[in-house]
Amino acid sequence: MPIPLSCPDISEDDVQAVVAVLMTPQLSLGPKLAEFEQNMAEFVGAKHAVAVSSGTSALHLCIRALGIGLGDEVITTPFSFVASANCMLFEQAIPRFVDIEPRTFCIDPALVERAITKKTKAILAVDVFGYLADWDALRTIAKKHRLALVEDSCESLGSARGKKKAGTFGDCGTFAFYPNKQMTTGEGGMIVTDRDDIAAQARMERNQGRDPSSTWLEHRTLGFNYRISDINCALGLSQLKRLPDFVKQRQQIAEWYREELSPLAEHITPAPDQEDVDISWFVYVAHMSSQHSEKDRDALLEHLRSNGIGCNNYFPPIHLQPLYKKQGFNKGDFPVTERIAERTVALPFSSHLSRTEVATVCRIVKDGILRL
Ligand SMILES: *Cc1c(COP(=O)(O)O)cnc(C)c1O
């Protein structure tokens, strides 16, 4: 039986919630949108939540709402999904990459300050895999230099440091609901913020530049169609109710992986915990030990795939993507990111993975290591 890298967890209630919307005349900009936003704002602990078509459109609207444009620089991490840097390119702004902390895989605050120039407008940090960036340190730097702070929390919905949840650490935070995330709406995204101005502008720009007092055919500013349908929102509402269970199940599965992988620690280390953070795991990323090369890692991934085990090399560094290499980035630019990225092994992970499946995956991992 193949085991996929990720798999959404859709219940009968989720299906019924979607079907119920289909029976109504309001498939977009209806009551489910408002309800989804309200429940999301409450869950995260933010004043506003603005639902949009994807995590990428959420990031794009945050960049625009902060007034970041042509030639402005934004400090960010190269160890992330490509959208966290692309959102600057959409507005002709410049991502200024800074290397990561090896313990958390998030941007290293100690390196941020020396990357600041007169053109720097913001810091956009990513809570990668569910780990939280060092937001206290980042906020101190942002305050000192009067920079905006954006939290790409697309991978950390439900993660918390004490009572403070992911999405609330910067001026605005973003979530994504693609089917491989902690919860899904099929496609979808969300901006969360305490700032009235950011929320208002995002609401206007997701809907073709209409403001709340506009008629349907009046467009106050340049906008996009970044709306999310009420069908997606109904699924989101139903999934959000189940999110606390998803987070617990994912923590249990991460624990099983740790137990099963521990005997192999000489070759592959389990995903580390983060001190002082309650992690909501997005993916389960184990790391090959330093005695192994990128070639060994790739051979292990190949072995897993040929045995029906979904896996991947989360993440190839953004600066080494063809799009960014064309702009002059090179291997060696961000050594910590590159050293880590060469050794990551993302294993199958979803809220309904069984203990037996985890054991099967780890048996095949062991098998693959013995062949190296
Ligand atoms: C998933 C993700 C996004 C974008 O989400 P989409 O909904 O696929 O557009 C952005 N940033 C990070 C870090 C992500 O993991």
Image: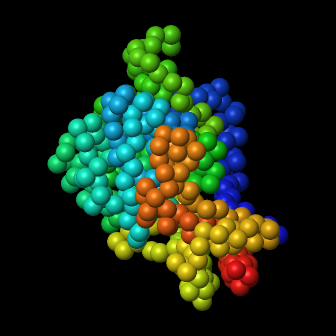
**Residue 163, x across and y down, in percent:** 33, 63
Query: In terms of depth relative to the viewer, which is nearer, 41 or 227?
Result: 227
Horizontal relation, residue 34 to residue 362: left or right: left
Residue 7 figure quarter: bottom right
Residue drawn at x 46%, y 38% as measured from the top left: 87
Q: Name, please, the residue furthest toward the left.
A: 144
Residue drawn at x 43%, y 33% as measured from the top left: 61
Query: In terms of depth relative to the viewer, which is nearer, 100 or 10?
Result: 100
Height in image: 354 above or below 122? Answer: below
Residue 229 figure quarter: top right
Horizontal relation, residue 137 to residue 325: left or right: left
**Residue 153, x across and y down, in percent:** 44, 52
Residue drawn at x 69%, y 34% as measured from the top left: 22
Residue 250 figure quarter: bottom right
Which quarter of the rendering shows the C terminus?
bottom right
Q: Is there any visible trace of residue 50 in the rendered image?
A: no
Residue drawn at x 70%, y 48% as measured from the top left: 15
Which quarter of the rendering shows the N terminus?
bottom right
**Residue 303, x across and y down, in percent:** 75, 72
Coloring scheme used: rainbow
Q: Is there any visible trace of residue 361 in the rendered image?
A: yes
Height in image: 76 above or below 294? Answer: above
Q: How many marks?
A: 0
**Residue 124, x across and y down, in percent:** 37, 47
